């Protein structure tokens, strides 16, 4: 057997519709039309898709509790999308695990990739990452001059 790709990740949220609106506003994920019937079951998932049309996240409504797991869902984007996201940080007002608001100073240079780490409204840990390392480095150097 050969696994082709990760199909989707389960995320527990306090309200599926509210979370779906947030994920669309922040990451551009939209409800998957072919899998929408699963939302008829209150315990079923609301499946979100990426721009490629593949399932990305399955939102499950659960009683809200403190997050007890150390899990981060990472979303890969190209350099242009990453830099665009970086430019909109002030308007997004995203929280960090330290209780602060995500800002440009939170950009993490992994030497092979760049990442930003933040929380969704239900305290699920998220990462936006790009492997277009040199393109982002050049753009950042050009903006600091």
Image: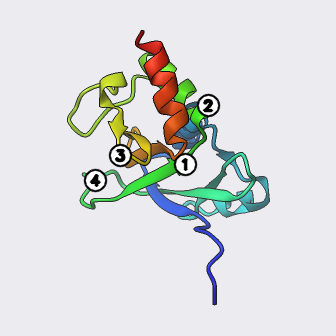
Q: How crowded is mark 1: few (under 14 residues within 10 Å), some or many (20 or more)?
A: few
Q: Considering the numbered disc 4 on the image, is that residue within a helix, a strand or a loop?
A: loop
Query: Sequence-wise, which precedes: disc 2 or disc 4?
Result: 4
Q: Which residue is drawn at 29% across and 35% down?
A: 96
**Could you tell me how far apart the alpha carbons at marks 4 and 3 are, in whole angstroms?**
32 Å
Foreground label between 1 and 4: 1
Which residue matches tag 4? 65
Tags 4 and 3 touching, CB below 8 Å:
no
Marks 3 and 1, Cα distance to the nearest angstrom?
14 Å
Q: How far apart are marks 1 and 4 (CA)?
A: 28 Å
- Residue 110 is tagged as 3
Q: Label 1's element?
A: strand
31 is higher (above) or lower (below) than 42: above
Q: Position of residue 11 (x, y in %)?
A: 46, 57
Q: Is mark 3 on a helix, strand or loop?
A: loop
Q: Which x, y percent locates residue 140?
A: 45, 23
Residue visible at 66% across and 59% down in the picture: 55
The residue located at (52%, 49%) in the rendering is 75
**Separation (CA) of disc 3 from disc 2:** 18 Å
* Mark 3 vs 2, N-terminal side: 2
């Amino acid at each position: 057997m050969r696994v082709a790709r990760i199909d989707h990740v389960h995320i527990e949220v306090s309200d599926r519709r509210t979370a779906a609106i947030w994920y669309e506003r922040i990451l551009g994920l939209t409800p998957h039309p072919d899998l929408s019937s699963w939302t008829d079951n209150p315990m079923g998932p609301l499946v979100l898709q990426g721009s490629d049309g593949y399932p990305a996240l399955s939102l499950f409504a659960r009683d809200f509790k403190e997050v007890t797991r150390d899990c981060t869902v990472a979303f890969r984007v190209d350099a242009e999308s990453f830099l665009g996201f970086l430019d909109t940080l002030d308007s997004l007002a995203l929280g960090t695990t330290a209780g602060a608001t995500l800002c440009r100073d939170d950009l993490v240079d992994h030497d092979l990739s760049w990442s930003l780490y933040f929380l969704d409204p239900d305290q699920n840990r998220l990462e936006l990452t790009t492997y277009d390392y040199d393109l982002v480095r050049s753009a950042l150097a050009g903006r600091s001059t």
